[in-house]
Amino acid sequence: MFEQNRYMAVIFLDRDGVIQYTNETYLEILNLSREQVVGRHVLEITPHSRAYITLQTGKAKVGYEWIVNNHHTLGTALPIFEDDQVVGVFGYTVFLNIWDGKNILDEILSNLNMYKDEVHRLHSAAYRFEDIHYQSQAMTDIIVLAQQVANHPLTTVLITGESGTGKELFAHAIHNASRRCQRPFVRVNCAAIPENLLESELFGYEEGAYTGAQKGGKLGKFELADQGTIFLDEIAEVPLNMQSKLLFVLQDQVVERLGGVHPTKINVRVIAATNRDLENMVRSGSFRQDLYYRLNVVHIKIPPLRDRAEDIRLITPHIISNLSQRLNIAEREIDEQALQRLCKYSWPGNVRELENVLERSLIIAEMEGARVLSGRHLNISEDKFDFNDLSEVKSLKNMLEEYEKKLLARILKDCQFDVPGAARQLNMDPSSLYRKLRKFGICIRKEYSIN
C-alpha cells in the first residue's frame, strides 16, 4: 500500500534508529537509492530527524512541518511499543500541496489520540482508593494517612508490608489521588533488573557509554517519570553501590545519565516499597542509613490479612466477582462455612494468596457445576498451631520447631519449590532458608510431600 502511494513518504526505524524500510516516494525526496538508505542510522540520512526524537522519548510527534530537499511535507512519527519498551518508530509525511485539510487532519488526530492513549496506558496508575475494600480500623487509619499524603505531591512515601498485602495498589492510589495523576506513573521492580543494568535503567545512558549501548542513548526511568511519580518496588534489593547514587537523585532531583556530563533537573515524586525490615538492614549495614531516612518521610505500613480478619468477609465477594469476569464464568456466592474457614486461616501470602485460593476454588466449582463455593472447594491447610491438640507434652523449643518445619514445608510447596521465592515471602535471606531446610531435612524437590 505504501509503496504505491505517490503522495506519502514512509519510513520505519528499529529500536537502534536504523532504517529498516522506506518507500520509493521518500527515496525520491532524499534523491538517494534504497541501498544508500536502508540499513543506515537515520541521523546519517536526516540529522534533524523527528522520528529519532520519538524513538528516544516514546512520545508521538504529529502534524509537524518537515522540509527535505525543498520538499515541504506534513510529518507524523509514531512509537511502536513491546513490553513497555519502544522497539521502533513508524513515520510518514504527506506533501502539503496535496493536503486537503479535513480528511488528513482527521486521520492525524485519530492517530494522535490512539498513541496518546497507548502511552498513557503504559505509564499510568491503574488503581484508586475506591478499589481498596476494607472495614477494619487498622486499614481505615492507613487509608486516611495515604489520602492525606496524596495531597502533597513532593513528599516521598515508604510503603512496607508482607508480600501480597497490596503495596503496589497503594502506590497507584496515591498517584491517582494527587495533582500528578495526569502525569506518568513509572513502576520499577528493583529486584527484577540485573545489578549491572540497574544504573542505566534508572538514570539512562548516553551514546557510547558502554559496549552495545543504543545509538543516541536512552532515557532512564526517572526522566520518563518527570512531572509524575516513580514507584520503586522492592527497594531493599538495590545494591549498596547504587544506593548512594539513588540518594543523590532523591536529594537534588537531578539525574545524570551513564556516560553523561550534563545533569538533568527533574520533578518526580518517589514512592518506594519493600516487604523487608529496612531498619534491621540499616543495622546490619546492608542498607544505607541516610537513604533510609530520605525514603522514610511518610511511612505507610500495611497490616497483614491475619490481623484484620474482618476485612476478609468484605473483600472476598469483590475478589470472586472480579475473578468470575476474568475467567468468564458465572459468578458464585460463598457459604458461611467457607467464609469462616477463610477468616480462621493465617494467610502468609495475604490478599494475593486469598485471590489464588479463590481462583482455584471457582475453577473447581465450575467443573463440578456447583453454584455456591463451599468449604470443600477451598485448598487451604489448617496451619495455625493448636497448643491444645498436642499428643504429648513437649518443650517450647520443640513445639516451635515442629510448627516452623511444617510452615516452611508448606510455603515451599506453595512457591513451587522456588527457594528464593519462598524466602521473599518469608522476608528472609535465601541462604538462611537453605540452612533451615537442611536443618529440618526438608527436600526441595517437587516429589517431596508434606505430611
Image (spheres, rainbow, N blue to C red):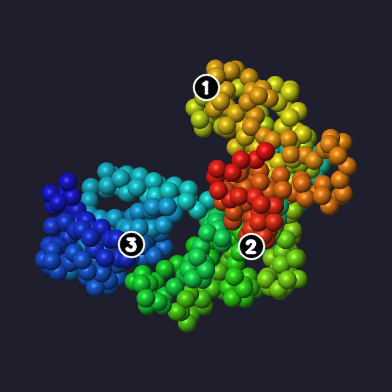
| Mark 3: secondary structure | loop
**Residue 26 horizontal/vertical position (percent):** 17, 60
* Amino acid bearing label 3: Arg
Residue pointed to by mark 1: 367
Q: Count neighbours of disc 1 (C-alpha within 10 A) and say few if under 14, some if 14 to 19, many if 20 or more.
A: few
Which residue is tagged 3?
15
- Helix, strand or loop for disc 1: helix
- Residue pointed to by mark 2: 431
Q: Residue at x 74, y 46 (%)?
A: 304
Q: Nearer the viewer, mark 1 or mark 2?
A: 2
Q: Is residue 333 above or below residue 81?
A: above
Above or below residue 281? Residue 106 is above
What amino acid is labelled 2 in the image?
Ser
Is 421 placed left or right of 215 in the picture?
right
At 54% from the left and 45% from the top, the residue drawn is 446
Are there few (<14), some (14-19), or many (20+) residues within 10 Å of tag 2? few
Q: Tell me if I can see residue 173 in this picture.
A: no
The residue type indicated by label 1 comes to Met
